[in-house]
Image: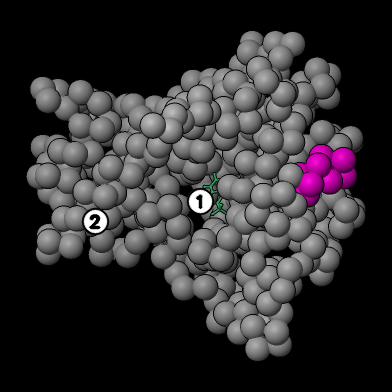
Amino acid sequence: MMSLSRKAQGVTPSATLAISAKAKAMQAEGHDVIGFGAGEPDFDTPENIKDAAKAALDAGYTKYTPASGAPDLKAAVAARYERTHGIPYGADQVVVSCGGKHALYNIFQAICDPGDEVIFAAPYWVSYPEMVKLADGVPVAVSTSAADNYTLSADAIAAHLTDKTKAVIINSPSNPTGTMYTREQLEGIADLALERGFCVISDEIYDEMVFEGSSFESIATLRPGMDKQTLIINAVSKTYSMTGWRVGWTVGPADVVKAMGGIQSHSTSNPTSIAQAAALEAITGPQDAVPMMLSAFQTRRDAISKLLAEIPGVTYAKPEGAFYIFPDFSAHFTGDIKGSNDLAIHLLDTVQVALVPGGAFGDDRCARLSYATSMDNIEAGVERIARALA
Ligand SMILES: *Cc1c(COP(=O)(O)O)cnc(C)c1O
């Protein structure tokens, strides 16, 4: 018998998979399942981006690029941050990875020694704790609630700092809640980071997916010198509806970026050359698809919020970006429904609606609904949920 490593045994496989596998199986059997599980935009990748990939393929752009990413893409990413963040990053401060997830994974590999602690808000994106553990770090999930918009205050972070604290993760807008940090909150966290010397990992994957009335701020820009202590991650995945292409990046201090490139050179090497060419077009080409998708998500956010608010006992923090809402269903936990997983199974069994149990994100009172789906599905799906909970 081959025995598994302690690390492999310590990884929690995605708890969301069981529900989505069941939903898929039911769909395959011909059941009319309405899915709110999607973690990706429902639009096609814009035409100009697909054309750039086809052109790259035809031009023979099919060989290795440098392991840390193609020089033209790195330069374009650096220029993008000069434009959006007002910080003159150099191309040596950019490493291109196989999606935002891979960028985050390599960050923890590069900065964590055994026992180093990484603080983040719960509910959290499912991969944060597992990635930290895979880097021999210790995840420190700090509970937040709808009342504080699911954000961490500087005080809450300060209360969890130890001499082992290596980094704090900020994800704004957030997956799974869609909520955002205010500028004042981020300034407070930046002041604390500068005073106490921890690094901030700013997961900015939804920075261009922010609705009217809110605005994106990067913590890296809010205090002089904060960029030297911040690792920004982003990807083309969500903004350009390119989840399958697998291109993301980290922007930050050159020494960390270089270490990440080194790690990458012994694992994946470069992201697919053709996908990098497509990402270059995504960043530098026409941007009109971005506001088009954003406007559709805002219309759907308005619709799903209104419909969910009409269900007695269901509450939520209003999403300001991304394409998720994270309602609290705990008022309906009775009888056999003891938590979010039971609720998800109940909704799937009784009214054929699939959503993701909040337990997977560290908050068992809630469930995540993605509104990256049609308005018809939103209306019919929430009506079914209301019926099942009545
Ligand atoms: C989708 C997502 C990512 C990364 O996605 P990739 O598909 O790997 O580019 C990172 N963080 C959050 C919060 C996400 O929702």
How would you rate the neighbour count of disc 1 (Cα within 10 Å): few for under 14, some for 14-19, many for 20 or more?
Answer: many
Q: Is residue 123 magenta?
A: no
Which of discs 1 and 2 lies nearer the camera? The answer is 2
Q: Position of residue 185 (x, y in %)?
A: 67, 29
Q: Which mark is residue 24?
A: 2
In primary-sequence order, the first of circles 1 and 2 is 2
Quarter of the image where the N terminus is located: top left
Label 1 sits on a secondary structure element that is loop
Relative to 322, is 156 above or below? above
Which residue lies at the image location 65% right of the left edge and 74% below the top edge?
Answer: 274
| Badge 1 vs badge 2, beta-carbon distance below 8 Å | no
Confirm whether the magenta stretch covers residue 259.
yes
Residue range (magenta): 253-262
Secondary structure that dominates the magenta span: helix
Residue found at x 18% / y 62%? 28
Q: Quadrant of the C terminus?
A: top left
Q: Tally the marks.
A: 2
Query: Which residue is label 1 attached to?
Result: 322
- Vertical order, 321 against 181 (above or below): below
